[in-house]
Amino acid sequence: MRVLDLADLSGAVCGRILADLGADVVKVEPPGGEPDRLTPPFVGDVENAERSIPWLAANVNKRGITCDLGSEEGRAAFGRLASAARIVVESFPPGLLRELGLDEVLRDTIVVSITPYGQDGPLAGVPGSDLEVTAASGSLWLAGEEGRAPVRTAQPQSPYWSGMYGAMGALVALRSPVAQRVDVSAQAAMTTVHPPAPVWWDIAGQEHGRTGPFLLGRSNVGSRFRNIWECADGFVSFAIQGGPIGRHTGRMLAEWMRERGAPTGAIAAIDWDRFDNTTLTQAQVDELEAAIAPFLRSLTKAEFFTEVVKRKMLGYPVGDASDSLADPQLRARDFWRTLAPAEGQRPLPFPGGFALFDGERPAVRRPAPRVGEHNAELYGEAGIDAGELARLRAAGAV
Amino acid sequence: MTDVATRASAPPASTALAGLRVVEMGFAAAGPLVGKYLANFGAEVIRLESRLAPDVFRTTYPPFKDGVVAPDRAGMFAFYNDGKRSATLNLKHPKGVALARALIAQADVFVESFTPGTIARLGLGADTLRADHPELIVLSSCNQGQTGPHAFHPGYGSQLSALAGFVQLLGEPDSTPVLLYGPYIDYVAVGYGAIAVLAALERRARTGAGCTIDLSQYEAGLQFLTPTILEFAANGRIPGRAGNADEVAAPHGVYRCAGADRWVALSVWTDPEWQAFCALTGVSGPPTAAGRRAERAALDRAIEAWTCSRERDGVVADLREAGVRAAPVLSIPELFSDPQLAHRGMWPAVTHPAIGPMHVMAPPFRLSATPSLQERPGPTVGADNDHVFGTILGLSLDERRTLQRDGVFE
């Protein structure tokens, strides 16, 4: 299945996912390469078009060609390629494909359009980066310390959400008999990442906001529970919880604290068989948390991880990239796949395919393309011979 | 809709996934939301549940309508399961398991999200089901995958988001990391889960083969952090919290506006944008982005001095007019009145039999010819037993009464 990927970094993950699943995805860039190839950081801190880490991450497993869609000859060449494509992914401002006269060419193709706010409506065409669409989605509102400015995830997330939903939309559209438009809004995509907050407003009229390291929405009386705690060498994620696993976790924690001779304080008095976190007052929660904090502070991340796994308790260390690469579970499942992200570079560990299909993990198999790397091959397949390609190149169309 | 929408060449199909039957057993968010999206595009999704072991979203997680804790009044369940049918089966009863198998035998897809090994112990493992029904697609979605040393470790999404590295990237540098509100990683796994099912359906259409899908929510989440892994592996740096700083844009931040808890997000990416920004706000600073990044703190103070006495929406309008990227930091209630989300029908209204009028969530992508359809609220417990056991499985009323009496439908 051929996919033509015209999208910049705001939508390139869509094609990456389809490529992981085995589609023949061809990145189509303007002559000279797309500007997002210069997005930092760079492999080895060398700034060039083949070393942008965010760009490489989103474009491995694809082949690449160049095409000037602004020129008539470029559009004609694109049209010949498009006739063999089932899916086209694009992130142009709404309406540009039509202005270029490409809607006719793509009439039998699924077109996935990824934009900040969608193809129509009052904000259609308004530019926005990760920060603005995250702000407009409510997810910025919910992240940060109370009373202080909201904060965003340091690794931009909206391109991943938009790309993922684009791929989902393309696959839904494949099941319908008509070729159609899949209109992804990054704002809407980021609105799906925090559903409990809209439910609290809609059903209970309660407005949730930033609570720093605390969890809201687990209490019937408005109490909040700490979820991020200091430990000896970083932070761990742990919470006082209810339900069968939450009660088991509390029981195991009390036992663990006693084994270590740690003062159990208010924890000692809890009957975990009857424990219900949803009715605790904030004062009761604070008292329990005051008893737990010194114990967690005495543990390293590694100690905490080993023990929660052994005792089947809820909780994890707060991990980072180095922890992920060392994680025994991921290694046991052969998750990491080594690939030189571009030809001539040293191999790096990539997250492997997102699921196992009949025990097989989709491969990270092909470096990201150099600018126009597959022009001869792909235009050749579309019936454009070497002579014609040379002419198009001379004219600046590819 | 624009160009492509208006030129559908075939008669409009009703829904993209009409004719697809999905049976689902699971709890909380990560499994059930996969079924929700499939239902929204026309699949018949049957949630099998039991009164003896209800979903924590029916029992433990507030809010409940009017604060009355009851399975049919659970807001979370109603919101996460719109479009589905509910049928109850007691899987501790041998006849319950037999009925579940009979139902799955008539389905295209089976989705489950229990701890690994749970459905196999019930006699509903993927190998067993596919022995009778090789074309079946089974999605097992769990915390850390079906195999490996941590496979049986219980976990919820908010803490798995910490393990995977999302939490470590959120907050001010040199301070405690903060949460992105809830089980962030679950929703990543939902997207990849639906993609995996749809991809398996596409393959089945070509080859006739079913598929057993093992989705680890942890591994799905790490896809979204690929650049941080590569940055560490290539350059030896561990990406961490950066407040709202960006490696390219400057300024790039969130600034206080007039009024209580009102904020504007804005970013400047090019020289012309910076000149327009200076002309509008009177703020001055280094002409290059690198220079401005070096003076971030002073620049942010100057910008906030300009925004803090002005109305948020006016600031956004003026910046956009000047060609600078800007957006209001919308609060949760404002999401329900935002004109752009409203235009896209982000919050379809439904009437739930126990909760009353409420909103559900539309998929964040719109299909021009076969749009999503959201008329059915999340089901009450066992609401569709007659349809499922009578119409689909063909049990007579007498047979169903006997099974009811024997506790099979508990």
Image (spheres, coloured by chain):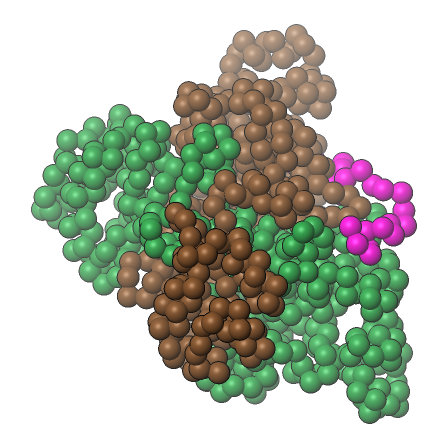
Chain colours: A green, B brown
The residue at 23%/56% (across/down) is A230
Residue B86 visible within the image: no
The picture quadrant where one finds residue A343 is bottom right
Image coords of residue A160 (percent x, y): 56, 60
Q: Is A144 on the left or on the right of A174, as rendered?
A: left
Q: Is B352 on the left or on the right of A109, as rendered?
A: left
Vertical order, A306 against A216 (above or below):
below
Quarter of the figure that contains the N terminus of chain A: bottom right
Image coords of residue A135 (percent x, y): 50, 55
The residue at 56%/12% (across/down) is B404
The picture quadrant where one finds residue A388 is bottom right
Nearest the viewer among B362 and A260 is: B362
The residue at 48%/60% (across/down) is B265
Q: Main secondary structure of the magenta part?
A: loop
Q: Is A155 on the left or on the right of B101, as rendered?
A: left
Q: Is A96 on the left or on the right of B100, as rendered?
A: right
Image coords of residue B221 (percent x, y): 49, 56
Quarter of the figure that contains the C terminus of chain A: bottom right
Image coords of residue A99 (percent x, y): 82, 66
The picture quadrant where one finds residue B255 is bottom left
The residue at 63%/66% (across/down) is A12
Nearest the viewer among A321 and A118 is: A118
Nearest the viewer among B339 and A28 is: B339
Vertical order, A102 against B32 (above or below):
below
Q: Does B16 appear in magenta? A: yes
Q: Does B384 appear in magenta? A: no
The region drawn magenta spans: B1-23
